[in-house]
Image (cartoon, grey):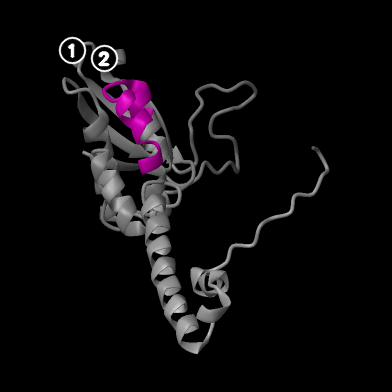
């Protein structure tokens, strides 16, 4: 019932509990030591069982188990990728693959990596290039640090999730985005206005 306190049962080690279950004649020094030894073996076995169960839960798995879970889901951990970022991607593996090959799936994959994005088909400004697309990424949970590893990581995600018939034409990082064209009441290049760092072209 709401507001009612629940008495929690204290979890005890087999090493302490098993000897207490024995009859009095077995609770002497040697009997106690024997049962305590059996209890320690049971405690170790229980710990291994719990560790094995936790290894199947992405949110709780230790790092080595998480790497195995990622491999099972067809994901690769990139060099230098933090444990938190890797765990987030493994948790989102179902959505990652469910929407693969779509514009939404590409945006979702980049968001899992820590970036908001805008995807622009090149045919909107060049009708002859129907299979190419531009990607603009913006800070979400992380910012681009300028490292070659991070650039490779972003490109790998794009190439892994994009439709097979499409090709990345340009990848640009905008630190102050996302960009909004012609917002109401805003004039371009007002005196003293600072737009932030210049966009960084990551590809080609």
List the residue tagged with mark 2: 123
Q: Residue at x 55, y 44 (%)?
A: 194
Q: What x and y, as percent, mark residue 50? A: 42, 56
Residue 73's label in the rendered image is none
Q: Is residue 143 above or below residue 134?
A: below
| Residue 182 is at least partly visible in this image | yes
Magenta range: 90-107
- Confirm or deny contact between disc 1 and disc 2 (CB under 8 A): yes
Residue 128's label in the rendered image is 1
Residue 138 lies in what quarter of the image?
A: top left
Q: Nearer the viewer, residue 172 or 184?
A: 172
Q: Residue at x 39, y 58 (%)?
A: 51
Task: Tell me the element at label 1.
Answer: loop
What is the tally of numbered marks visible in this picture? Answer: 2
Q: What x and y, as percent, mark residue 71? A: 24, 45
Spot the residue most to the front.
25
Q: Nearer the viewer, residue 46 or 154?
A: 46
Judge left or right: residue 66 versus residue 176: left
Task: Tell me the element at label 2.
Answer: helix
Q: Residue at x 26, y 22 (%)?
A: 101
Judge left or right: residue 155 versus residue 82: left
């Amino acid at each position: 019932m709401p507001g009612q306190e629940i008495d929690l049962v204290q979890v005890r080690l087999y090493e302490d509990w098993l000897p207490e279950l024995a009859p009095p004649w077995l609770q002497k020094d040697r009997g106690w030591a024997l049962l305590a030894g059996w209890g320690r073996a049971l405690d170790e076995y229980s710990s291994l069982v719990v560790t094995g169960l936790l290894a199947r839960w992405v949110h709780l798995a230790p790092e080595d188990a998480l790497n195995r879970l990622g491999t099972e889901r067809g994901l690769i951990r990139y060099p230098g990728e933090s444990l938190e970022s890797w765990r987030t991607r493994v948790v989102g593996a179902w959505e990652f693959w469910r929407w693969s090959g779509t514009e939404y799936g590409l945006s979702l994959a980049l968001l899992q990596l820590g970036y908001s994005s805008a995807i622009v088909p090149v045919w909107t400004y060049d009708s002859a290039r129907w299979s190419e697309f531009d990607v603009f990424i913006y800070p979400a949970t992380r910012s681009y640090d300028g490292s070659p590893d991070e650039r490779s990581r972003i490109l790998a995600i794009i190439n892994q999730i994009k439709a097979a018939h499409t090709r990345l034409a340009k990848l640009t990082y905008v630190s102050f985005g996302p960009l909004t064209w012609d917002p109401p009441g805003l004039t371009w290049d007002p005196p003293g206005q600072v737009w932030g760092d210049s966009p960084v072209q990551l590809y080609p």
